[in-house]
Image (cartoon, grey):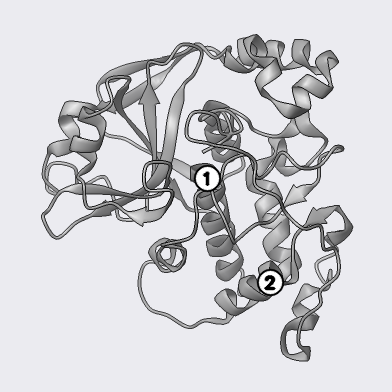
Amino acid sequence: MHRVFGLTHLFACGCAGKLQADSECDVSDEVSQTCSSDSGYNLSNVIYTSKDSVEVVKLLRQKFVGNEVFHFARHFIGRPYVGYTLEISDPERLVVNLRQFDCTTLVETVCALVMTKRQNSDNFSDFCQNLEKLRYRSGKMDGYLSRLHYFTWWMHDNIEKGLFIEVIDKVYFTAPKTVNNYYMSQHASDYKMLASHPEWVDSIRAMERYANGADGHYLPQTATKFSPEQLSVIHDGDIIAIVTTKAGLDYSHLGFAVWGRDQKLHLLNASMVYKRVVEDTVTLYDYLAKRKTSVGIRLLRLIGK
């Protein structure tokens, strides 16, 4: 990913990909009107290409039956994995990039598409507004420090906005989670914007400390091999956040839950291992077992629009 789930996607991210800043919709008459700011959203603060805007409109106009999250997430299977695609603008602007993903931008893009579809809109500016709502504190972009860099921040802020509920039960979700985030503030030189603005580090450190502490329970790795009947609380398309024991971090990776034909949990994700978006044939249990620092999962379900 690259946000600190890792951090502005840290441990699942590689080198920054480059985006073309294209604030005008250079598209056909058929879709050009959907790139306007009919919703009042200011597209001058958005970095995107005409290819991005056209694809968003076409996706939103598709008619389909079934799981909304799966429909959009599976559309992106095969797209390249690229980290740090958000770290391209100072001052901060909303980055839209459907051509390459890290684990977090895949989740945000898919959720923004679902939210816009639920609003019965095919307007690119509405999609951008929803993406901003997901990515930034209280739903408003106000500089780099307003971005929800850690998953703990992202989860709680989006639950408070009424966009998600946490998926949990009292039987299997028994492992207590304690958050102790400090990676960004202690490794500021690893972050392009923090390296350019060392005066922001104290603010990041204060936000880290404010959100640290006991924070609910998660499903331990050993329980992820249980059957769909035992884990009936988990639905296809739920967001999976992988709990990590890596120093200074809360979660290391994001993806979508998939109940496979083998009746096992799998992960649809932008994979650093495969270098692309995949619906992994490896079970989630085996995926976690191969990574000593990956000790379990937290789950969210999109309910808002």
> Which residue corresponds to mark 2?
51
Q: In the rendered image, which quarter is residue 59 located in? A: bottom right
Residue type at mark 2 is Lys
Q: Is residue 79 left or right of residue 233?
A: right
Residue at 27%, 46% in the rendered image: 234
Image coords of residue 238 (percent x, y) = 37, 49
Q: In this rendering, is residue 233 above or below 61?
A: above
**Foreground pick, 305 / 292:** 292
Residue at 69%, 16% in the rendered image: 188
How crowded pointer 2 is (Cα within 10 Å; few <14, some 14-19, many 20+) is rated as some
How crowded pointer 1 is (Cα within 10 Å; few <14, some 14-19, many 20+) is rated as many
Which quarter shows the C terminus? Answer: bottom right
> Which residue corresponds to mark 1?
102
Image coords of residue 175 (percent x, y) = 27, 19
Image coords of residue 242 (percent x, y) = 37, 32
Residue at 71%, 73% in the rendered image: 123
User: Does the image show residue 245?
Assistant: yes
**Foreground pick, 235 / 76:** 76
